[in-house]
Image (cartoon, helix red, strand yellow):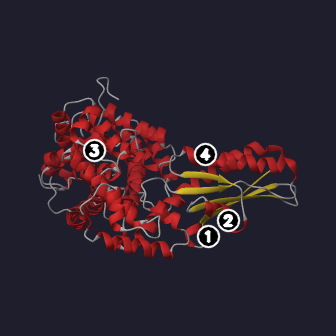
């Protein structure tokens, strides 16, 4: 929070600080979706003149307060129709509940916004509920919150009082550790045959653990993560052995390893579930999940693909800050990879989106904060960048992306050893199917800064193998190979870069990439530009 009472955000003059009245108004709107609101009433509740509130909403969200409220209500209607709680739910009943009292006007507005009639949405929602093993879980899948996981409280027979106490303690510590990641809604329950207790919570995922005394006297902890919506399909499992004499150490090891494995397994399952849904049945959260691998891929083509999905998600749920913040980061990537013809306009769009995300996210979502930190760094607001990413790490220490962005921040501060530690931690937290090219490139760049050219070249090649579309990596690989004296490899890397980006010149790099554009050239950027010029990249 800024000292003047505004929410501090990443933003240049077109963005500026987000006034507190916007945050207060949005919070009130979320609580009052089924109640009537007038503009004078809203302004009075926020403690500002009505004209001031109108101006702030226009600046930070692009439309008037009541227009935003109406969009929020339309999104709420769609969520209710996609996940009908009552068997006899009707379009008119749901619409009326959220303040739409003229059926004809409502139906027309709904169709213009979502591309289908409300009755068609309700029909799909009912069909999905009939085909779902648990209708409550369907409802949760269309709400904007963390996926639910049930941790079964372990009652182990025939192992004695000590191991029974260990099993109970382990369950509680696992549930607490998973809850502290802020990535899940966690339920700690007593087991029942066929994991019925887990299903009763409405959780989609179940973590079950069995404690066994081996004939040798050792203790074995067997862990199993399953997806309850897919016939209890196992997503991950492992076994950990220890001794009765050192149960605390075994517990700590199990908790660390299980939490580290459960999160990427569930993230991968969530993305795959969103990918499998029909296009017409996607909620905003599904689109964000689909977009996330492209957001993290670290190449402009992927960023453009993600941007299309994120813009659609913004239309479906105008109160969700995550697609707005991720869209800001996608536009920032066009600057970092010199993939725009109008860098000033592109940066302004990114800054405006970052400001809008801050207005929608007064409490702080780790992904939103991380995306905003990426926007801030291109404006050379280093203190703000580190503050945002540090908050993201504190809120969600098990998330990989804040550690990745911290690695690039450490490179900006000429701290290659600290950068490598951050990137390696990001890789450990990332799932086996998640994009890793940007982390590998970061480690390679840290080696380059430390003068370890062989390691730098190896890591850049590994990054390119992980994502061949990240052609921008060749500009650094070419320079590294040139400094190693490998002139042919350097020429090959530059040729690959020019085939992928024929419009690229030294002048374009200088005019587009943040820092170079403002004349903030340092030894590293000078080495890159001089090396590319030596290899023949046109001026």
Viewer-side residue, 237 vs 354: 354
Q: Nearer the viewer, mark 1 or mark 4?
A: 1
Q: Looking at the image, is mark 1 or mark 4 earlier in the sequence?
A: 4
Q: Nearer the viewer, mark 2 or mark 1?
A: 2
**Residue 108 coordinates in the image, percent (x, y):** 21, 67
- Quarter holding the N terminus is top left
Task: Indicate whether 226 appears above or below 351.
Answer: below
Q: Which residue is mark 3?
A: 37
Q: Is residue 303 left or right of residue 176?
A: left
State whether residue 22 appears in this view.
yes
Q: Secondary structure at mark 3?
A: loop
Q: Nearer the viewer, mark 1 or mark 3?
A: 3
Dot 4, how many residues are within 10 Å of its Cα: few (below 14), some (14-19), or many (20+)?
A: some
Q: Which residue is mark 4?
A: 177
Find residue 195 and name its label: 2
Dot 2, how many residues are within 10 Å of its Cα: few (below 14), some (14-19), or many (20+)?
A: some
Mark 2 and mark 1: Cα distance apart in space: 9 Å
**Residue 405 coordinates in the image, percent (x, y):** 38, 44
Q: CB atoms at circles 2 and 1 under 8 Å apart? A: yes
Q: Count the marks.
A: 4
Q: Which residue is mark 1?
A: 232
Q: Secondary structure at mark 2?
A: helix
Dot 3, how many residues are within 10 Å of its Cα: few (below 14), some (14-19), or many (20+)?
A: some
Q: Looking at the image, is mark 2 or mark 1 earlier in the sequence?
A: 2
């Amino acid at each position: 929070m800024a000292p003047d009472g505004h929410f501090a955000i990443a933003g240049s003059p077109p963005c500026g600080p987000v006034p507190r009245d916007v945050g207060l108004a949005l919070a009130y709107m979320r609580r009052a979706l089924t109640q009537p609101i007038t503009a004078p009433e809203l302004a009075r509740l926020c403690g500002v003149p009505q004209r001031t509130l109108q101006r702030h909403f226009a600046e930070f969200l692009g439309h008037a307060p009541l227009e935003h409220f109406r969009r929020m209500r339309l999104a709420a209607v769609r969520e209710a129709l996609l996940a009908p709680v009552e068997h006899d739910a009707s379009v008119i009943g749901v619409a009326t509940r959220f303040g739409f009292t003229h059926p004809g006007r409502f139906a027309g507005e709904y169709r213009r916004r979502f591309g289908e009639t409300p009755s068609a949405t309700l029909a799909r929602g009912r069909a999905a509920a009939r085909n779902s093993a648990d209708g409550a879980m369907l409802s949760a899948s269309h709400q904007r919150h963390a996926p639910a996981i049930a941790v079964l409280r372990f009652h182990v027979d025939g192992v004695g009082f000590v191991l029974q106490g260990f099993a109970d303690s382990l369950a509680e510590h696992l549930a607490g550790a998973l809850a502290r990641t802020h990535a899940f809604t966690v339920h700690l329950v007593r087991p029942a045959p066929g994991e019925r207790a887990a299903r009763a919570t409405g959780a989609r995922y179940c973590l079950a653990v069995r404690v066994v005394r081996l004939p040798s006297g050792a203790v074995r902890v067997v862990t199993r993560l399953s997806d309850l919506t897919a016939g209890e399909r196992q997503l991950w499992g492992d076994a950990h052995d220890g001794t009765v004499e050192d149960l605390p150490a075994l517990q700590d090891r199990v908790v660390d390893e299980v939490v580290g494995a459960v999160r990427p397994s569930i993230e991968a399952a969530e993305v795959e579930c969103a990918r499998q849904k029909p296009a017409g049945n996607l909620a905003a959260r599904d689109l964000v999940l689909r977009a996330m691998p492209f957001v993290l891929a670290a190449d402009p083509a992927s960023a453009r693909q993600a941007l299309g999905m994120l813009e659609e998600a913004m239309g479906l749920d105008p109160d969700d800050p995550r697609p707005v913040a991720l869209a800001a980061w996608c536009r920032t990537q066009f600057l970092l990879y010199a993939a725009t013809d109008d860098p000033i306009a592109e940066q302004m769009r990114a800054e405006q989106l970052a400001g809008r995300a801050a207005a929608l996210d007064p409490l702080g979502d780790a992904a939103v904060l991380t995306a905003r930190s990426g926007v801030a760094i291109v404006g050379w607001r280093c203190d703000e960048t580190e503050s945002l990413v540090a908050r993201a790490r504190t809120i969600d220490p098990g998330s990989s992306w804040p550690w990745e962005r911290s690695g690039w921040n450490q490179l900006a501060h000429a701290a290659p050893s600290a950068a490598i530690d951050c990137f390696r931690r990001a890789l450990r937290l990332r799932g086996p199917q998640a994009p890793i090219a940007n982390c590998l490139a970061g480690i390679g760049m840290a080696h380059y800064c430390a003068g370890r050219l062989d390691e730098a070249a190896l890591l850049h090649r590994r990054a390119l193998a992980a994502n061949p579309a990240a052609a921008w990596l060749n500009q650094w690989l070419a320079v590294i190979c040139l400094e190693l004296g490998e002139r042919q490899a350097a020429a090959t890397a530059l040729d690959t870069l020019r085939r992928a980006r024929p419009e690229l010149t030294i002048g374009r790099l200088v005019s587009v990439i943040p820092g170079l554009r403002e004349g903030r050239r340092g030894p590293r950027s000078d080495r890159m530009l001089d090396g590319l010029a030596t290899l023949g990249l046109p001026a």
